[in-house]
Image (tube, rainbow, N blue to C red):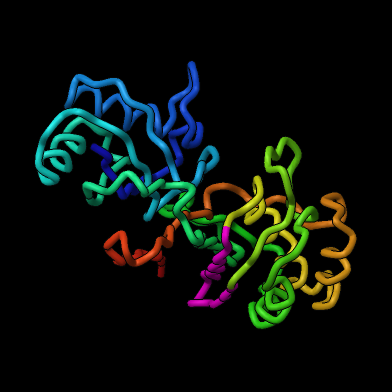
Amino acid sequence: MRILLSIEYDGKNYHGWQEQKNPNTIQGQIQESIFKFSQEKIKLSVAGRTDAGVHATGQVAHFETNVKRTEEKWLLGLNSFLPEDIRINYVKFIGNDFHARFSALSRTYRYIIYNNKVKPCINRNKVSWYFLKILDEVKMQDAAKKLIGINDFSCFRSAHCQSNTPIRKINDIVITRENNYIYIDINANSFLYNMVRNLVGSLVLIGSGEKDIHWIEDLLISKDRNQGGKQFPASGLYLVNIEYESKYGLRNDIYYPKYN
């Protein structure tokens, strides 16, 4: 039997999603909770492998099991063995034609910048901080529109990226401001290693006035990561949604984190 998990987590205390021998990871914690609940050792397949410090409100994974429990018992049982900063939001029995990664149509990330001279306190591990200038989110949005479509995104690709190709399709980028918080929502078919955080760094150069709007086009053509903006911190990044075909009957309750 194949089981789908919708997962939320605070990534601050973890060395990313992927299971490793020594460091504490999200995958390791969830697999351990499944073993404690079912006495089965399983391997999770995941939609998006988030890096150390990155959060998620809509991660999706699946696994195979021979243990028969109701969806509700799986939900309550797994959560009872998980730490407080990881939660299973819902459980669904799913057909064998579903795969968390390969069935995904798109992924959506939200990046949050706290744009103020004073460093954030309570939300310090949930946002990134930019204090040098007041950012112009309208210019950032105008530049972001030039990235929409199918492109070679090598200029936003970090070293050690294992993808076979730098070609990706960005479907949409929406940038908004509420008081001191800037929200950058990016939807694409998939992402390169550190792509969102590198892209944000380049958009900030435009929002701060260091670069003009058309510079982003030159950067894209250059395919040179060294010409782009700095990589922004993991603390501001959230995986908020994985899109699948409607035939799978998944819930569509997307949560975009916001701070005031």
The quarter of the picture where residue 70 lies is: top left
Which residue sits at x=14%, y=35%? 77
Q: Is residue 33 above or below residue 212?
A: above
In this orientation, which residue lies closer to the viewer: 177 or 221?
A: 221
Q: Position of residue 220 (x, y in %)?
A: 82, 64
Q: Position of residue 251 (x, y in %)?
A: 27, 63
Q: Is residue 91 visible?
A: no
Q: Is residue 203 visible?
A: yes
Q: Magenta stretch: give its range.
A: 172-189
Name the main secondary structure of what is drawn in magenta. Answer: strand
Q: Is residue 247 above or below residue 68?
A: below
The quarter of the picture where residue 164 lies is: top right
Q: Is residue 9 above or below residue 190?
A: above
Which residue sits at x=86%, y=50%? 226
Which residue sits at x=24%, y=21%? 40
**Image quadrant for the N terminus?**
top left
Left or right relative to 253: residue 161: right
In this orientation, which residue lies closer to the viewer: 91 or 204?
A: 91
Does residue 186 show up magenta in the picture?
Answer: yes
